[in-house]
Image (cartoon, coloured by chain):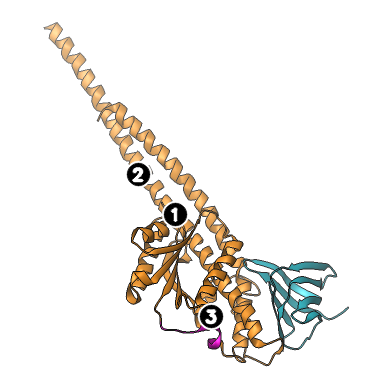
Amino acid sequence: MAKAFHLTIARIGENVFDDEAVSLTLPGSEGMMTVLADHEPFISELAVGEARFEAADGKHYHIPVREGGVIEISHNQATVLL
Amino acid sequence: MALKDIKSKIQATQRTHKVTKAMEAVSAVKMRKTQQAALAGRPYARAALSILARLSGSVHLSEHPLAEERNVKRAALVIITSDKGLAGSVNSGVIKAAVEALAESLPREEVTVYAFGKKGEEYFARRGYRVAEAFENKRDDVPRSVVKRFTKDLTEAFAAGEYDEVLVAYSRFRSTFEQVPTVHRLLPLSLESVTQLVQDIVPQKGKWSELRAPASPMEYLVEGAYEDVLDAVIPRLVSASLYHLLLESKASEHSARMVAMKNASDKSKEVTQDLTRKYNKARQAAITREVSEIVGGREALAT
């Protein structure tokens, strides 16, 4: 099984997801990108679109990104603010 | 006082007791709910803060239009109060704190008031302040759409130079028995003030319980420009702060109301007891009088 990383997705006043994930695909400001474990430190703005990710338990999630957002990755930990 | 009067008074007091007791229970439930909501909002604020803290190593935060320190000539005041009263001194405390903070720096013509909640609006409108917008604060949750739009208005006005400072007067929730009226400076944004705010959020168990040190700023790979990322993070942080302040005010309101209603219930119980004693005394006095009248009458007939 692929290596996992910690993923936190939060909206104001609401925690959407906060657990281990295997892969994360996002609409970055310069096109879609996929994040796997041990990504190097990275920050980007998000464009409007849809975020998809696979949790460590194999479940797939789709979350709409309606108003853009920010992704930050460091220490094998990804944080997405919507 | 006639017997009947006392009796009706006892009944009235008991009815009041029932009402205050019910309000106390309702406020207790609402308080717990708002506290939970405040906790749920914490990871967001934390994450936004740590992103900002790490970015601050690479770019100068103070160069961002929303973090720019200017000489304060015009200010906006966001006053967060409740719509309803019967909540002890919460609202008056907040209003007092706001007025004190303003009086130090600015004449009232230069202050624009945004009011969440009727109490604050009424106060400032009556005293000739310019109330730009008033929001209802009746609901138990804080509508996110309102917060978002309001943040946008505020940040745009600040960036355009309409205000040099945005203050928020709210009631900080320390515990059920202690709420502190506080004035927080929302804009210009500074890392310290936001850190303070995030730390104040009640600790939660688990991952976010210890303040994850906004670790040493390190090199990041950035897609696009740093400025673009800042532009995305800062308004979100402002919005999250505002959301949190609103929630905290709500928690304060409910807990203050709960305590006020508890006191009222206790008092009404006491009054009922006093009145009951009075009632018994009056009844006994009436019986004694009647007996002595009968005895007296009988004796008068016998002689």
Q: Position of residue A4 (x, y in %)?
A: 80, 79
Host chain of mark 1: B
The mark found on residue B270 in the picture is: 2
The mark found on residue B66 in the picture is: 3
Q: Quadrant of the N terminus of chain B?
A: top left
Q: Bounds of the magenta span?
A: B62-71
The mark found on residue B257 in the picture is: 1
**Residue B49 occupies quadrant:** bottom right
Residue B112 shows up from this direction = yes
Q: Earlier in the sequence, mark 3 or mark 2?
A: 3
For chain B, give the colour. orange
Q: Earlier in the sequence, mark 2 or mark 1?
A: 1
Of circles 2 and 1, the one toward us is 1
Of residues B279 and B65, the one drawn nearer to the viewer in this rendering: B65
Kindly identify the residue that appears in the image at 67 percent across and 68 percent down.
A15
Mark 3 lies on a secondary structure that is: helix
Q: Is residue A53 above or below residue B290?
A: below
For chain A, give the colour. cyan
